[in-house]
Amino acid sequence: MKKLIPILLPFLLLTLTQFAREARELASDSFDWSQVNSQSDQAKYIVGKIRKWQSEDPAGEGKKLRVVYFYPKDRKPLKNHLQRWDRIMNDIQEFFSVEMTKLGYGRSRLSLEKENGNLKLHEVQGTANDDGTYSYKSGGRIYNEVTKALAKEGIDAKSETLLIVCGLSRTDGKKVEIYSPYYGMGASQNKGICFVADSDWLNIDGLKVDKTNTKIQVKEHRGYEPFTLARFNTTYIGGTIHELGHGLSLPHNLATKFESTKGTALMGAGNYTYRQEWRDEGKGSFLTNAHAIRLLVHPVFSGTSKESNLNSSLSIDDLSLKYIDGDLHLRGKTKSSIPAIAMIAYNDGENKGQKKYQVNNDYDATTWTSVISPNNEFWIKINDLKEGNHQIRLVSVHANGATTTHRIHYSIKDGKPDLNQANKDIKSFVSS
């Protein structure tokens, strides 16, 4: 009997290994992916998962968006700036709430600071430079002044999401010159910075039908250009919510063919279509499902700052990219220090003149999503495929608002996909 033990041991180990593998496969097969094919079913599943995580160890309130109004040392804020920006930010808050509700995520609200029932504006008058010295490139200088001013209020700007409204425009009758920074930068679940411009003509009523048919001339990066009052407010209030999206860590993206029936993606060219539907001039702007998922867990939306100061590690196993019946199927299994609630694939095409597989992270990246199964697996199906070289940015969205990104490259020529580079990319970061 003792002689049989060395002979049986390898057999027993092999059997146990095979049993464990079959058990994993059975667990994987037990999840019914057909139940989360639709966007609404994905939303229901994701909401359940995030609510469970948040309730297990509730800790801390969410964070609020800090809205700062900056103006130079030799000027005053533009007229009616408090009233105008209270209404603008309330409308932006309503837009996000309605869009999140439509997608099945409930009325997740952008958290705004209030003072006596109105928007709290942190007013910062510059101390170092006169009006004429500021330009589009002055973001760093303005941020430094804002940081110092907020510190006096006990606010650490480096751990806040800031919307900095710059009173850097001049109005002469119906002529407007804008010379303000206008972009978002440096965003994560913990912080974000975005700059936008104020103008005397900027207000919510300007988004509605203008029976006076007012026309203004606007100069920003080029010479003066004609704007209707409605187009001006759509462009610059739309620009505000678009840049705020960047401050909340949302990159550019493009509506898929299916999504485009709703209008224009907010983080695509949605800044130019914001509230057009109010004037029957188009379908307006909408929030894509991928970006709703990212906002759902951002501390400025989620109502909790639980573990928001942590960045999650993520590893992916059993990752594969296959072309099946006209779609790319991206499947894998994750392991992370903070639970991932969803996976997003940004499918971004290469632009003309670029080196192979170098993309701009620009406006033509369509987004495709998957839930994370109880077995920590995901399955993303990508269509709307086009000729050329492409990059898939695979983004995991974690329960605390953090994200991690992996990149995979592939090509399509004459309708046939080439996945050789994708397989090399997958091998490199799975093995690492």
Image (cartoon, rainbow, N blue to C red):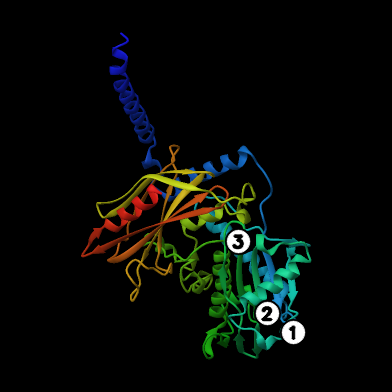
Q: Considering only order in the chain, which callout, 1 or 3, is on the residue closer to the N terminus?
A: 1
Residue that appears at 67% across and 58% down: 64
Which residue type carries mark 2? Gly
Q: Quadrant of the N terminus?
A: top left
Q: Considering only order in the chain, which callout, 1 or 2, is on the residue closer to the N terminus?
A: 1
Determine contact: label 2, label 1, CB under 8 Å.
yes
Q: Is residue 269 visible?
A: yes
Residue that appears at 31% across and 17% down: 6
Identify the residue under disc 1: 75
Identify the residue under disc 3: 94
Q: Is residue 102 visible?
A: no
**Residue placed most toward the observer, 305 or 121:** 305
* Cα distance between the residues tagged 3 and 2: 24 Å
Q: What is the number of the mark on residue 54?
A: none
**Residue placed most toward the observer, 332 or 256:** 332
Identify the residue under disc 2: 167
Give the crowd class for mark 3: few <14, some 14-19, many >=20 residues within 10 Å.
Answer: some
For numbered disc 2, what is the local secondary structure?
loop
The relative height of residue 16 versus residue 246 in the rendered view (above or below) is: above
Which residue type carries mark 3? Glu
The relative height of residue 117 versus residue 222 in the rendered view (above or below) is: above
| 3 vs 1, front mark | 1
Give the crowd class for mark 1: few <14, some 14-19, many >=20 residues within 10 Å.
Answer: few
Residue 417, horizontal then vertical, whole percent:
25, 59
Which residue type carries mark 1? Arg
Residue that appears at 50% across and 61% down: 287
For numbered disc 1, what is the local secondary structure?
loop
* Cα distance between the residues tagged 3 and 1: 32 Å
Give the crowd class for mark 2: few <14, some 14-19, many >=20 residues within 10 Å.
Answer: many
Seen in the image, is 223 located left or right of residue 9?
A: right
Residue 341, horizontal then vertical, whole percent:
50, 46
**Residue placed most toward the observer, 421 or 347:** 421
